[in-house]
Image: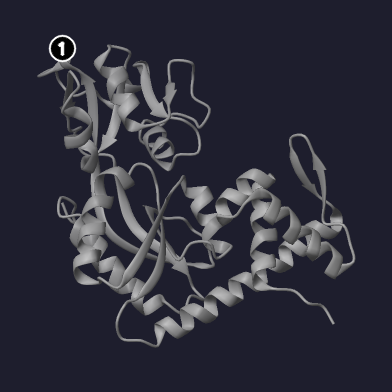
Amino acid sequence: MLHLTIRQLRYFDALARHGHFGRAAEACAISQPALSMQIKDLETSLGGVLLERSARGVVLTRFGEELARRVRDILRSIDELSDFARASRDQLVGRLRVGMIPTIAPYLLPKIMGNLKRMHPELDIHVRESVTPKLIEELAEGRLDTAVLALPVSEPSLTEVALFSEKFLLVRPAADEGAPEPSIEMLREMRLLLLEEGHCFRDQALSFCKIQSSPPREVLDASSLSTLVQMVSAGMGVTFIPEMAETVETRSASVSVARLKDPQPSRTIGMVWRKTSPLARQLLQISEVVCLSADAGSRPGTD
């Protein structure tokens, strides 16, 4: 009979995801020697080699790769058992793992956290900021309970709930204050500053400007909206930001902000979670708090 523990499975899952003993040990909040010993015990119990060690990290063996897939399913089922127990209570309590994209988190998160702590004080909220593809992956693997992002994500295994919509604002150098808003054709001729690949906000801006996903060299990339706005302030080009970011990102920059003529570019913000999640009813309550927190936004379909 195998003598495996849930702790060993979680340690192995972390090692499989991070591919490095040091990073996996940090994620599990244990020492690297302790992690190594637990993995060695797991290999002994299973009677097989799970990984190959190298100077750069670890590589899973074929046996290790197959085990990693099965372990993820096991851990997801265990987490859903816990969620099932929590879902039976009337009050929202316990850990809630929320993902959020970088073009929302800095601007909406403080309000969301404040409202959740006031309305549901028993919740232990853990926030993970990342790009949409990574959040969807972590939702599917059971490492997140829900995510706040731009819709649609068009993932059949997820429930999508639209919360509000917001416009995109055009950010130009301060010298352009009062100048007519450019047309889409004029925007395509400008040096457009965008977030780097992987950000859905980048794809939405390119789509509005009718620029292909592989834009010309006139399009420059940055890793954050803050950097984009400062690049505009330095006269390097123009960019878009979402309405919720305007106050934070433009207060210390010498830029001009304008709304484009209709049809204005916009996005719909919503929440997603696994269709199998026992916490669906509770997550709907959370979505109402998120919507309340976005008091500057508007409901989908409204101006």
Which three-letter amino acid code belongs to the residue tagged 1?
Answer: Ala
On the image, the x and y values in percent for residue 151 come to 39, 54
Residue positioned most to the left: 178
Mark 1 sits on what residue?
A: 175
The answer to whether any part of residue 68 appears in the image is yes
Reply above or below: 241 against 15: above
Where disc 1 sits, the SS reads helix
Quadrant for residue 20, please give it. Answer: top right
Quadrant for residue 228, please give it. Answer: top left
The answer to whether any part of residue 16 appears in the image is no
Reply above or below: 107 against 283: above
On the image, the x and y values in percent for residue 16 come to 70, 53
* Label 1 environment density (alpha carbons within 10 Å; few <14, some 14–19, many ≥20): few
On the image, the x and y values in percent for residue 43 come to 83, 62
Reply above or below: 29 against 170: below
Name the residue: 21% across, 58% down: 114
Name the residue: 46% across, 85% down: 85
